[in-house]
Every structure is written in structure tokens, then in C-alpha cells.
Image: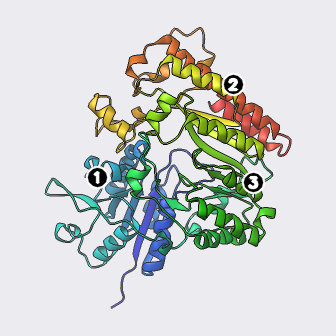
Amino acid sequence: MINKRIKLVLVYHQMKVQGNTPHFGLLSLGAYVKQKFPNVDIKILDNPNPLKQILKFKPDIVGFTGASMEYKEAKSLAAKVKKRSKALLIIGGIHISTSPQTFSNIFDIGVIGEGEITLGEILKLYKNKQINHQHLNQVDGLVYFHQNKLFTTKPRQLIKNIDDLPIPDRSLIPMENYLKNQLNLYGIKRLMVITTSRGCPYHCVYCSSSVHWGSFRFHSVEYIVKEMDHLINKYKVDGIVFWDDLFIAPKSRVLSLVEEIKKKGWDKTMVFYGQARSNMADEDVIKALKSINVKRLSFGFETYSQKMLSYLKVNSVSVKDNIRTVKLCNKYDIDVTAGLIVGSPKETLKDLKITYNTMKKYPLDVTNIYILIAYPGTKIWEFSKKNHLVFDNMDMDKIHTEIPLKACFQFWKKDRFYFLKDHVFLNQEKRHDQKYLSMILKIKLLATIQNYKYYFKYIFRDPKIISKVILNFLKK
């Protein structure tokens, strides 16, 4: 008897194309399945309209993923698949991992936490026709319905050594779609993103990374170099972004990686970006990163008010650390990108003015302004829930609010803060405070002006940058 091959589709139903950032979770799952289950045909779809492709593949199993603001769309797509297919429908990702109680019976199974081993056990059950309560209940890290009752199995143990996982399999996605039409500020033609760790050792009140991933674990230098070598040789990549929550931890690892990059000669042929944290970015680290041609570092400065920073980052970093880091990066000619958060509970007009004035005194290359979001599983989510601002099965679109640039100029409008309507704004005390809200718009406008000064520095290196910057401006 010939064993029937299992056809598996993994879907990330992204509503917007995410530039050069593929979905690492699906790439890791795909690589793991290819390595461990040669009888499985696997396909990854990561475009806005995947329904026809899903049905054309005639899958046995469809796996969906998504963050909280994508969960509604994942359910909608799954419902359409369910009407036209008898495939087993699985949902994984950060939303269902942090909010398993919101699991919908549109899906057959939810995967909580890391998915590689769990998906492998589901594939074994499927092959043996054992997708039932008796057997599912023996698999760690699942949520599912049985007889209209929600069951959650015991937590899946973390993968202790993530080097045991194969490198993400990018052959499963159309890589050229990610490598073309990039905004190339440093003469890079083919920029790709990698992750070298899982989780974060810190527990900021707004971040769900440590909740989803558990303990902080990181790949060895040897593993990272192997993946970089693969990208450089197979895909002719000339720029790499280290997209970890905290790329520079631990310090010994990043310094060892710097030495290996030099041995390979990539410091002469490549450009690098990374994400860092100011309390860990000392001069040794910044100097080492500069030596391998790191052009830009991204930080979560969040605010220049020490009171608010201590709240958001749980007393783990100071404003002095942030300013010291800006000066260090300026000294070594490394561009600085940072995120700033507004709209936090208990934030005052005075706090915003401190941020605004510090932005003027220490202008960054790129500053992104965010209204604080309460993500499920975080401390700020629990605060918001207690104050009846959010609830488990709410429309997750309402937790996310962007500040439209045009609002900064609409002085004639009676309500310039229309973008807050029907959305969660966590600083309830200031929701209707015109001076406070106007200062948020001033911060947004200042950041935009500073950002475009930075972009125009590079405009003549790539003529396409002009049109891309203008299109980006118009979208805002």
C-alpha cells in the first residue's frame, strides 16, 4: 500500500505587503516539516488574497497565523476555506498563544506557543487518522473544542536549544518579491531580514514577546553565520537586518559574531542594520558594530519622560541611557531609528513637552510615533481590561490607532482628533484634553520633518528614492 502524501498549506493573510520581511514563523515551520516529514508537500502563502491558491492546492491541512489585529481576517479566510474544503484548519501565532480563550470553532485546532514540534505531532495524528479528542488531549500546547466545550492542553515545553531547528526555508516563498523595489538608502540592492533569537529578557508593560516566546533563547554564532552564508550565496543578498527584539544580547555573542563576519570579509561587502537597547549599547558594542559596517540601529526609546519610561519599561532603562546611546551612535556615524509612545495612562502634557523638547535637542534620523496599544497577554492589556477599555472577544482593529499626518495640518477641523473615535485610547483622563492631544500632533509633525530631512540626504544615491518617499508621504 502506497502512503498518501499529506498536502499542507501555511497561510499568513497579511493585508499589506510587509516590504522585505517574510513571516519567520511560517518559514521555520516549513523548514521543520520538510526536514522531519518527507511525505508532506508544503506550500506557504503570504499574500493579501490567498483563497484561490489555497483551494487550487487542494490541501489536507491549512495552517493560519496572525497577530491580534489580523485574527479577524484569519477567521474570515478560514470560514471561506471551510465552505469549500474538508481540510483540517489550524490557527497558530501570537494572538491565539496569548489569548487561547478567544479560539473560534471556525478552526479545528489552535496551537499555543512554539509550533514546530506541536505541528509535527498533529501531522502524525492526521496520518494515523487520530484527529479526535482522545488523541488531541495528549498533545501539549493545543486549544480546541470538543462537544462545544473548550479544551486547553498543558503548555508545550520550550525548545531549549533553538540551534536544533533548521534554518528558515526561504525556497518556500517567492524571494524575489521581497528583494525587489526596496528603499535603498545605503546603496544596498538586495536587503533581507533574519532573526537570531526568540523572545526578550525584559518584560515591558506593552510587549507580548516574552509572553509568547517564554524565556529568552538565542542562536549560536555558528548557526547565524550559516544562515547568512546561505542568503549571501544563494540569493546574492548585500544587506542584512537583524530583526530580533534584542540583537545585541548577550554582549559576548554579538562581539564573537563581529569577529566571524570580519573573517568572512563581509564587513567589506555587506551592510547591516540591527535592533538594540540603550542600556546594553555600550561603547565596546557600538564600536564593534561600526567595524562591520552597521549603518543603522533601531531602539525603543518610547519617551523622554523618565516617569513614563520607568512605567513602560519597568525601571530597566533610563532617559540618560537613551541620550548617551544617541551620542555614541553619532560619534561612530551609525544612524539611529527609534520608536516613541504617546497616550500612556497617567501621561501628562508636561511629559509630552519633555519628549518634544528633547526631540528638538537630540534629533534622530528616523523617529516613529505610536499611540500605546494594549496587546493581549501584556500588563497593559490587564490594566485596560480591569478598566473596561478592552475585552477578550472585542474587534481587535479598535486597539490600534495610527496618527494620520494630515491631522497635523487640519487646523480648520472642529475635531482634529477624529482618528481616536471608536478606538481604544488608554489615557482616558486626557482623551478630550485639547492641549494634550495637540501636543501629540506637534510631536508627530516634528518627527515627520526630521525623518524627511534624513531621507533627503540619501535621495541622490538612488533616484527611485524620490518617488518612494513621496508615495510614502501621501499614504500618511
Residue nearest the observer in this picture, 179 or 392:
392
One can see residue 431 in this view: no
Label 1: element kind: loop
Residue nearest the observer in this picture, 91 or 331:
331
The spot of residue 460 in percent (x, y) is 86, 41
- Quick check: 372 above or below 190? above
Where residue 290 is drawn, which disc sits there?
3
Q: Residues within 10 Å of mark 2 (few under 14, many from 20)?
A: few
In the image: residue 201, left or right of residue 177: left
Please give the name of the residue rendered at 37% of the width and 36% of the height, measured from the top-left corner: 380
One can see residue 347 in this view: yes
The spot of residue 343 in percent (x, y) is 47, 26
Distance from Cα at disc 2 to Cα at disc 3: 26 Å
Query: Could you tell me the amino acid type at mark 1?
Result: Ile
Distance from Cα at disc 1 to Cα at disc 3: 50 Å
Residue nearest the observer in this picture, 194 or 18:
194
The spot of residue 178 in percent (x, y) is 64, 56
Q: Residues within 10 Å of mark 1 (few under 14, many from 20)?
A: some
Label 2: element kind: helix
Residue receiving disc 2: 360
In front: label 1 or label 2: 2
Query: Could you tell me the amino acid type at mark 2?
Result: Lys
Q: Earlier in the sequence, mark 1 or mark 3?
A: 1
Label 3: element kind: helix
Q: Earlier in the sequence, mark 2 or mark 3?
A: 3
Residue nearest the observer in this picture, 1 or 419:
419
Q: How many labels, in total?
A: 3
Query: Could you tell me the amino acid type at mark 3?
Result: Lys
Q: Quadrant of residue 65?
A: bottom left
Residue receiving disc 1: 106
The spot of residue 60 in percent (x, y) is 36, 69
